[in-house]
Image (cartoon, helix red, strand yellow):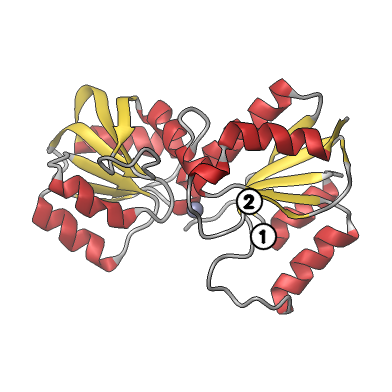
């Protein structure tokens, strides 16, 4: 058993959310019990995630996608009322980290993908930005686009959308988990061989063709599972608390 304060201070110290501007509040979003025995982690604080947390008898939910996004309706009505009511009635803490969890150099979504896809020499894609959200690196060995696609498919357990010649040789790769597809332009400008993101937009394909950069959309959910999972494992190692990762599957 740990206190809510101990958990939040470890998370703040690790993820340092004040270093990056974000579209949502990072840290505690809905306050629950002060004593925490069990934490569940997951990608998004959907109703299914909340129900699973209640069923697991959790005292805290730690997610990548929480609530209160910039520009969203500020009222607590409809589905949002149902979600927040469930959390408050169960006295659960909802804790969310968005961009700080994408960019963390070891636990972050991008860093976890580098590990899974065997990418080395990782650095920021946004030149001169110390907190670059998109990153770039090199494959340990030259691979064709077909081989890289297979690595990604096997690693994420999901068939990605691919644009480019299967035989194209790939050495340099840039990527951004989730909805980071617009960074393809920056990768194209830098002459990188392949760009990976979670989502795809109609225009991403045209940009890929015109920059002659291979493009892989591997899924928003699939590319953002591993950061929060790694963060949960880190918390369990550092503090005397039980942590369970719950994957609510999402094909997007
Ligand atoms: Zn996301």
Instruction: Give whichever of discs 1 and 2 has the lower sequence position.
Output: 1
Residue visible at 38% across and 39% down in the picture = 153
Q: Which residue is mark 2?
A: 248
Residue visible at 69% across and 31% down in the picture = 10
Q: Is residue 162 at all visible to an observer of this figure?
A: yes
Q: Quadrant of the N terminus?
A: top right
Using a 10 Å C-alpha cutoff, classify the residue at mark 2 as few (fewer than 14 neighbours), some (14 to 19) or many (20 or more): some
Q: Residue 167, position in %: x, y? A: 12, 37
Q: Which mark is residue 46?
A: 1
Residue visible at 82% across and 40% down in the picture = 4
Camera-nearest label, 1 or 2: 1
In this rendering, is residue 90 above or below 115? Answer: below
Q: Is mark 1 within 8 Å of ligand 1?
A: no
Foreground of the two, 215 or 137:
137
Q: Residue 164, position in %: x, y? A: 16, 48
Q: How far apart are the alpha carbons under marks 1 and 2? A: 9 Å
Side of 248 where 209 appears, left or right: left
Side of 175 where 219 appears, left or right: right
Q: How many marks?
A: 2
Q: Residue 103, position in %: x, y? A: 45, 39
Residue 31: quadrant of the picture: bottom right
Q: Residues at badges 1 and 2 in contact (C-beta under 8 Å)?
A: yes
In this rendering, is residue 51 above or below 81? Answer: above
Q: Residue 116, position in %: x, y? A: 42, 29
Foreground of the two, 95 or 146:
95
């Amino acid at each position: 058993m740990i206190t809510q304060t101990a958990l939040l201070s470890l998370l703040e110290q690790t993820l340092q959310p004040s270093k990056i501007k974000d579209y949502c509040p990072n840290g505690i979003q809905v306050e629950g019990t002060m004593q925490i025995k069990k934490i569940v982690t997951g990608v998004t604080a959907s109703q299914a995630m909340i129900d699973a947390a209640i069923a697991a008898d959790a005292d805290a939910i730690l997610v990548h996608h929480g609530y209160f996004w910039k520009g969203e309706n500020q009222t607590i009505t409809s589905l949002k009322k149902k979600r927040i009511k469930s959390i408050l009635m169960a006295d659960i803490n909802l804790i969310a980290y968005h961009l700080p969890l994408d960019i963390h150099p070891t636990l972050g979504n991008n860093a976890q993908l580098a590990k899974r896809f065997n990418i080395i020499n990782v650095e920021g894609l946004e030149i001169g930005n110390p907190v670059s959200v998109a990153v770039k690196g090199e494959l340990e060995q030259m691979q064709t686009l077909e081989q890289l696609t297979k690595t990604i498919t096997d690693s994420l357990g999901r068939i990605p959308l691919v644009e480019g010649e299967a035989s194209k040789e790939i050495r340099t790769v840039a990527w951004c988990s989730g909805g980071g597809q617009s960074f393809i332009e920056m990768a194209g400008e830098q002459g990188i061989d392949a760009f990976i993101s979670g989502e795809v937009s109609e225009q991403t394909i045209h940009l890929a063709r015109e920059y002659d950069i291979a493009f892989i959309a591997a899924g928003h959910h699939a590319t953002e599972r591993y950061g929060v999972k790694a963060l949960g494992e880190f918390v369990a190692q550092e503090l005397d608390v039980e942590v369970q990762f719950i994957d609510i599957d999402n094909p997007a």
